[in-house]
Image: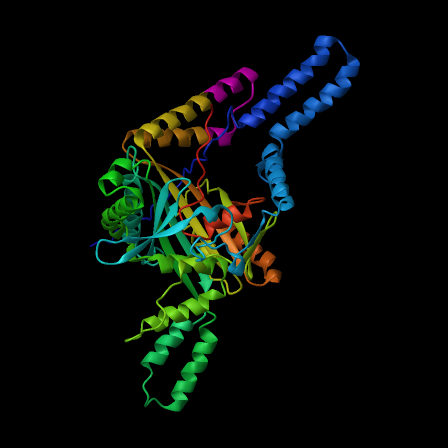
Amino acid sequence: MSLTHTPPDTYHGWQAEKSGFIGNLSGVGFSLVAASSVIAMIPIYLHSWSGALVALPLAGLLLLLAYGRVMGLAAEEWIFLAVRHQIAVATRRNLFYSGVFAPADKDGNQPMDLPGTLARLRILTASDGQGGKVGIAHNPIDSTYTLVARITFPGLALVDTDRQNARVRQWATFLRSQCKEDGAIVRLQVHQRSLPDDGEALRSWTARHTSPDAPPVAVQALGELMASAGPAATIRETYLSVTLSSARARLAVRGAGGGQIGAAAVLVREFNAMTGTLSSAGLQVVEVLDPRRVAAVIRTAFDPDSQQMLSARTSAAGTEGWTGTAPGLDPALAGPAAAETTWGLYQHDGAWTVTYQVRGFPQSEVFATFLQPLLRPRSNARRSMSLVYEPVGPSKARRELSRERSKRQAAGILRQKTGRAESEDERREDAVARDQDIARASGQGVVRMVALIAVTVTTLEELETACAELQADASDAGLELRRCWGAMDEAFAAAALPLGMGLPPRRTAL
């Protein structure tokens, strides 16, 4: 009898989203090129050499703004971010103060007070249909509702390849099932945190289970062991966020009672329908977070020092006959006491965070575990990684892929006319785009995706070391990272919080 070994599946072909108005130029970039061409032609039309001394340098400057790159950003995008940041600094909108300064409502109560783009969010309370409560993050500007669930999974590194391949395929099946025409679910976010374990849960469990008759020497040895090993450990928290658009689901929302109550009911119903497919992929829903636990997740991201207090509260609430404070936190206390946004750093309460966006995935074939280096345990910093997905409906996917293929074909014709040879990167991108369109036509789903990683420290002197370690781990994973310059507060909200944020609308040609 011969034993067969199934090789693990490999993955490749991530397609960068094109957002250019023409080619790789944005609408502003195309306008700069057009203006440059017009200015360069003026002295020729006027037959003026003195005019050329002024027009040609100006035309060159406009071309530089259109095609120049500054740390991965187009020059015109960099200038836009810089101007926006300087305006925010001048008007002090980069500063946030809450706590005793938080505004109170007409009844004298202080509602949840969050900085920046999070200020519009409200945490609603909904029924889970089984007598429990669910916390729903409501964004009234976008008319979206987000449910957050804590999940667990057995991991991929230590399982056999057949099971590993099956789990990844089931996750792909889950994503494909959300690519429905005019589907109500507009975003899915997988959020994972890797943070130092303070050992509070272990100490609380040990105190509850230590026998009064235990030898004092054994109790002392166990206490010394926990004191040395507990803080050196790390824990991981994984969350799945599901975001519903009330505009897309207006008929279902109306049938469920309308308004916020109807939207929350539809979202809970949609999530319950997902649990079967999630279980097939090896993901187990531990709990759907209630309002207090959603607030605790937000609070611990802004204030890592609160992790120990909230962990102790959760451990104490697990004791029999507990009548003290419930696990979690009052939503009114979810936000930071103070925060400040600088050009390349975000300071919140007693911590500092730098956020990166994954700008390039591996071009070669990789295994399903290629992201593991990003969440390696670190004793000096906590890391948060968010993968945000937007399911694209079949009709929209067909239109967008057709538009991209047409733009690529036009670019190829232009290369032939100008005599420029096709580069290997362009050839590879064309092949990936063609394979993607073939997969879509055969019934596969299409999703937009963005990956963001945040590194947080509580000691400023350790920040650059933590950032260097993250970039080294990203290099091991084959990823290209770019620091989110000029937008650290918005990037923090997307990377460090499981609230379904972080994927901007797709920019297309007008």
Q: Quick check: 117 left or right of 214? A: right
Q: Is residue 426 magenta?
A: yes
Coloring scheme used: rainbow
Instruction: Report how many numbered discs are placed on residues in the image.
Output: 0
Q: Quick check: 391 left or right of 343? A: left
Q: Quick check: 324 left or right of 503? A: left
Q: Is residue 229 magenta?
A: no
- Can residue 3 be spotted in the picture? yes
Image quadrant in which you'd find residue 320: bottom left
Q: Quick check: 201 left or right of 465? A: left
Q: At 22% across and 53% down in the image, what residue appears?
A: 129
Magenta span covers which residues?
Answer: 410-427
The main secondary structure of the magenta stretch is: helix
Q: At 52% across and 18% down in the image, what residue appears?
A: 414
- Can residue 6 be spotted in the picture? no
Identify the image quadrant of the N terminus: bottom left
The answer to which of 94 and 372 lies nearer the viewer is: 94
Instruction: Please say if 343 is above or below 14.
Output: below
Q: At 44% across and 33% down in the image, what residue appears?
A: 506
Instruction: Please say if 232 is above or below 156.
Output: below
Q: Going by the picture, which residue comes out furthest to the right?
A: 50
Instruction: Please say if 135 is above or below 362.
Output: below
Residue 421 percent coordinates (x, y)? 54, 23
Q: Going by the picture, which residue comes out furthest to the left?
A: 1
Residue 409 percent coordinates (x, y)? 45, 21
Image quadrant in which you'd find residue 46: top right
Residue 93 percent coordinates (x, y)? 58, 47
Residue 479 percent coordinates (x, y)? 49, 46
